[in-house]
Amino acid sequence: MLKRLLFLVLLCSSTLYAAEFEGCYLIKDDIASAVTGETEERTSYMHVTRVAEDYFIEGTLFGANFHVCSIGSTSEDVAGPLKMTREGDVLVYRESDEEYDFSCELSVSRKGNMLVFKDEGGQCSGGVFFCGARIGLNGIEIPKVDGECPTENQ
């Protein structure tokens, strides 16, 4: 009986563990124009999905002076959502090119209800994704929300 109970606990905890990244992460900010000083509300979001053992992420972040950073289908070099690999409690994307001495590692983790990005050195922000001068991925934190992510930039 104890073995069956332990098995059920492990089964349930692995199911909860697997779903913790999935969903919509979204934040609305007032973005100011460096030229006019006028502000507009913009929605930054990331949508995380899972298919079998693969995780996919896509979305758009807004930074100062309306600079944008896009991951996934809106990125210049990435068609469709960005495929990431789960390594323990972290989702990881790696890309490198020895010929151009280029290497990027983007990691995404959870801290409470926040999705946290790590792109030390900005190699992914500057070399893989379309990120403007005033927005990058390193240190970005976005809260998880109930409901659907936007289908286009707002």
Image: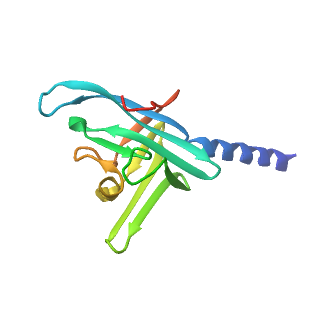
In the visual, does 67 lie left or right of 22? left
Q: Residue furthest bottom?
A: 99
From the image, which quarter does the C terminus lie in?
A: top left
Colour treatment of the image:
rainbow
146 in relation to 22, above or below: above
Image coordinates of residue 47 in percent, x first then y, are 48, 39
Image coordinates of residue 77 in percent, x first then y, are 39, 54
Q: Nearer the viewer, residue 109 or 29?
A: 29
Q: Give the residue displayed 44% in from the left and 47% down from the top.
A: 72
Q: Quadrant of residue 45?
A: top left
Q: Residue furthest left?
A: 35
Image coordinates of residue 57 in percent, x first then y, are 48, 45
Q: Quadrant of residue 12?
A: top right
In the visual, does 110 lie left or right of 74? right
Number of callouts in the render?
A: 0
112 in relation to 4, above or below: above
Q: Is residue 21 visible?
A: no
Q: Give the residue displayed 23% in from the left and 37% down from the top.
A: 64
Image coordinates of residue 95 in percent, x first then y, are 42, 63
Q: Is residue 5 visible?
A: yes
152 in relation to 139, above or below: above
In the visual, does 118 lie left or right of 112? left
